[in-house]
């Protein structure tokens, strides 16, 4: 694996750990696609830093469990603005 990719995977993992951000937010900050962020933290990071990967996985699992709530809130705000 390319050293640049390793560093990016670690940086993304640390960012998600520190901010509890979603994959989408991390992708926006690092200027890469959601697919790249997901691949970095689920496939590459466990090979490089297993403990960090475990923490990130736990955060992503919580984000996934709360996803429907965030989506509902966004829809509520959207229609509240329209009226």
Image (cartoon, grey):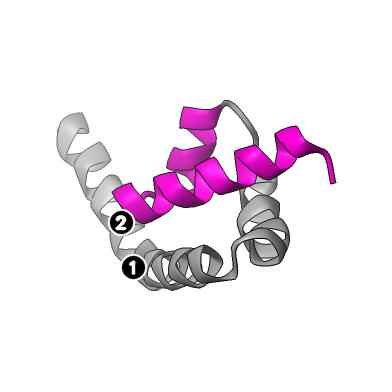
Q: Main secondary structure of the magenta part?
A: helix
**The C terminus, quarter of image:** top left
> Is residue 14 something that shows in the picture?
yes
Q: Position of residue 31 (x, y in %)?
A: 58, 26
Left or right of residue 6, residue 50 in this image: left
State the residue position of label 2.
Answer: 70
User: Tag 2's secondary structure?
Assistant: helix
Figure check: 4 above or below 38: above
User: Tag 1's secondary structure?
Assistant: helix
State the residue position of label 1.
Answer: 66
The magenta segment is: 1-30
Figure check: 32 above or below 21: above
Residue at image point 29% right, 46% down:
74
- Do residues under tags 1 and 2 come within 8 Å of each other at their CB atoms? yes
Q: Residue 18: say if magenta.
A: yes
Residue nearer the viewer, 53 or 73:
53
Label drawn at residue 27: none
Q: Position of residue 55 (x, y in %)?
A: 44, 69
């Amino acid at each position: 694996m390319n050293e640049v990719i390793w560093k990016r995977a670690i940086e993304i993992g640390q960012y998600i750990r520190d901010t509890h951000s979603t994959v989408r937010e991390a992708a926006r900050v690092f200027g890469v696609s959601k697919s790249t962020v997901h691949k970095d933290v689920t496939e590459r990071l466990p090979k490089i830093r297993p403990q960090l990967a475990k923490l990130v996985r736990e955060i992503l699992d919580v984000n996934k469990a709360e996803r429907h709530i965030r989506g509902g809130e966004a829809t509520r705000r959207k229609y509240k603005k329209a009226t």
